Image (spheres, rainbow, N blue to C red):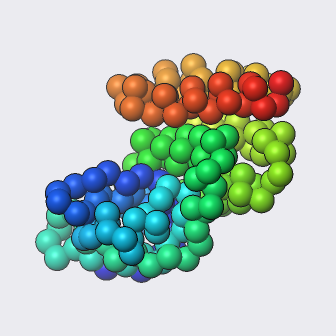
């Protein structure tokens, strides 16, 4: 396998002495995992942050092996690390994406929506502008994975997210819920204070 793509970083897990396994979401190839040598070094650490966009090159020599990933910066959102609400939102949508999407299957609508949500978080002056987009992204992700259900997604963003919570846990997170729901709870808590 040899893939070159622009992708949104969704997860970074330290691996070995200096490396990391990075999950990145591209429009055409879906969620792709790759091992990045030197990921915790001075050059790559600020590049490999969830929400950032990279130009990536994934290479696999033997089928079934984890790809090696070479990552170059394309668009950085690292300046938001000092914004607790914005970073909580980015942590949640990227963690949700990484935890739920099957690897190497394209979801172009989800990719476009995630890119839009991240851009709104980055550019909007207040959570009121982008909070509803988070709930809509959750709803779209449920639908894309085959769990569209009756129900309204109208009202305040926190109420919309409350409607989605049970469906996310019951249908797509399952055993992985403990790993990612803490990020969601942090976001909801901060949103309640910000948009109430």
Question: Which corner quadrant of the image does residue 84 belong to?
Answer: top right
- Judging depth in this view, the residue of 44 and 128 nearest the camera is 44
Image height check: is 74 above or below 133? below
Tell how many labels. 0
Name of the residue lying farthest toward the left = 62
Residue at (28, 53) in percent of width and height:
14
Indicate the position of residue 124 as horizontal and vertical percent values: 81, 54
Image height check: is 93 above or below 18? above
- Judging depth in this view, the residue of 42 and 13 nearest the camera is 42
Indicate the position of residue 18 as horizontal and vertical percent values: 22, 63
Residue 61 visible to an observer of this rendering: yes
Residue at (66, 36) in percent of width and height:
139
Image height check: is 80 above or below 2? above
Residue at (32, 69) in percent of width and height:
41
Residue 27 visible to an observer of this rendering: no
- Say left or right for 84 vs 120: left
Report the quarter where the C terminus lies: top right
- Say left or right for 196 vs 10: right
Question: Which corner quadrant of the image does residue 93 belong to?
Answer: top right
Residue at (44, 47) in percent of width and height:
98
Image height check: is 65 above or below 121? below
Indicate the position of residue 1 as horizontal and vertical percent values: 27, 75
- Judging depth in this view, the residue of 1 and 9 nearest the camera is 9
- Say left or right for 55 vs 62: right
Indicate the position of residue 70 as horizontal and vertical percent values: 34, 77
């Amino acid at each position: 396998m040899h893939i070159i793509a622009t992708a949104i970083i969704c997860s970074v897990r330290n691996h070995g002495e200096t490396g990391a396994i990075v999950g990145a979401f591209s429009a055409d190839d879906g969620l792709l995992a790759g091992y990045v040598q030197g990921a915790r070094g001075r050059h790559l650490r600020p590049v490999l942050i969830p929400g950032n966009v990279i130009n990536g090159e994934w290479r696999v020599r033997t089928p079934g092996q984890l790809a090696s990933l070479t990552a170059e910066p394309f668009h950085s959102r690292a300046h938001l690390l000092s914004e607790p609400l914005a970073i909580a939102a980015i942590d949640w949508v990227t963690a949700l994406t990484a935890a739920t999407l099957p690897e190497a299957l394209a979801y172009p609508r989800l990719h476009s929506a995630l890119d839009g949500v991240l851009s709104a978080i980055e550019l909007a002056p207040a959570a009121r502008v982008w909070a509803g987009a988070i709930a809509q992204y959750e709803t779209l992700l449920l639908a894309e994975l085959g769990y569209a259900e009756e129900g309204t997604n109208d009202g305040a963003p926190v109420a919309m997210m409350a409607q989605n919570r049970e469906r996310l846990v019951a249908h797509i997170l399952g055993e992985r819920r403990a790993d990612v729901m803490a990020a969601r709870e942090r976001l909801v808590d901060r949103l309640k204070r910000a948009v109430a």
